[in-house]
Amino acid sequence: PGILDMEQFYGWALETLLARNYHQKNLGNLNFYFNSASNLFEPIAYDMLFAPLGDTFMVADNRLLNRIMRHQPFREVFEARARAYVENSDNLAADLAFFDTVTQTIKNDVIRDAAKLPPTADFFAQTRFYRDTIEKNFTQVKKWLEEGKSIPMTFAEEIYPLNEETCL
């Protein structure tokens, strides 16, 4: 916490949870911004990929999440923030409205771009999948918190010293 803006981290971790983002992990796409006004690093949500949540929130492939969420006081703050977010159904409505607005804004450009890969049909299938995933993950997190009072997490067992094999 001495070098990391924890409020920004909790927000980023919540985005990571709700997206079941598996693309920002130890080996890439994990980016930070140094805020000179606060002298703290802030995580940047970059190149997130949506996927359905499984039985747990997989933090094992992200060393920072893995370490911070193992520390009970930090995990409790994160889960309180997640609980407050999913208990307010207006947040899901706002998330879906934002997604729909972005999709609508780029739709005509996607249709006009005949040289793109993947083709237009894939774009529409993926946007439906991503929109459904947003809704399902929101509902899953809410269910976890209602039923078990905690978000189930899968952690990595880190071995020291860290080397190429233990970083994967």
Image: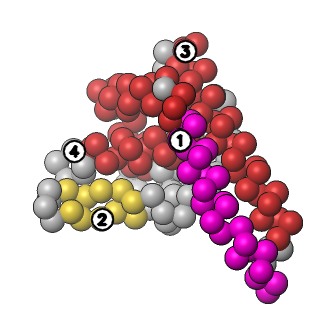
Q: Say whether residue 147 is left or right of residue 107.
A: left
Residue that appears at 38% across and 25% down: 80
Residue 33 tag number: 2
Residue that appears at 38% across and 30% down: 81
Question: Which amino acid type is shown beneath numbered disc 2?
Answer: Tyr
Q: Which sits earlier in the primary sequence, circle 1 or circle 2?
A: 2
Q: Which sits earlier in the primary sequence, circle 3 or circle 1?
A: 1
Q: Which sits earlier in the primary sequence, circle 1 or circle 4?
A: 4
> Secondary structure under badge 3?
helix
Which residue carries the number 4 mark? Answer: 1
Query: Which label sits in the foreground, 1 or 2?
Result: 1
Give the CA separation, mark 1 to mark 4: 30 Å
| 56 lies above or below 48 | above
Give the CA separation, mark 4 to mark 2: 15 Å
Question: Which amino acid type is shown beneath numbered disc 4?
Answer: Pro
Give the CA separation, mark 3 to mark 4: 29 Å
Give the CA separation, mark 3 to mark 1: 22 Å
Residue range highlighted in magenta: 92-115
What crowding class fits label 2: few (fewer than 14 Cα within 10 Å), some (14-19), or many (20 or more)?
few
Q: Which sits earlier in the primary sequence, circle 3 or circle 2?
A: 2
> Secondary structure under badge 2?
strand
Query: Which label sits in the foreground, 4 or 2?
Result: 2
**Residue 58 at what x, y percent from top left?**
57, 40
Q: Say whether residue 106 is left or right of residue 87.
A: right
**Residue 65 at what x, y percent from top left?**
42, 44
Which residue carries the number 3 mark? Answer: 146
Residue 94 tag number: 1
Q: Which sits earlier in the primary sequence, circle 4 or circle 2?
A: 4
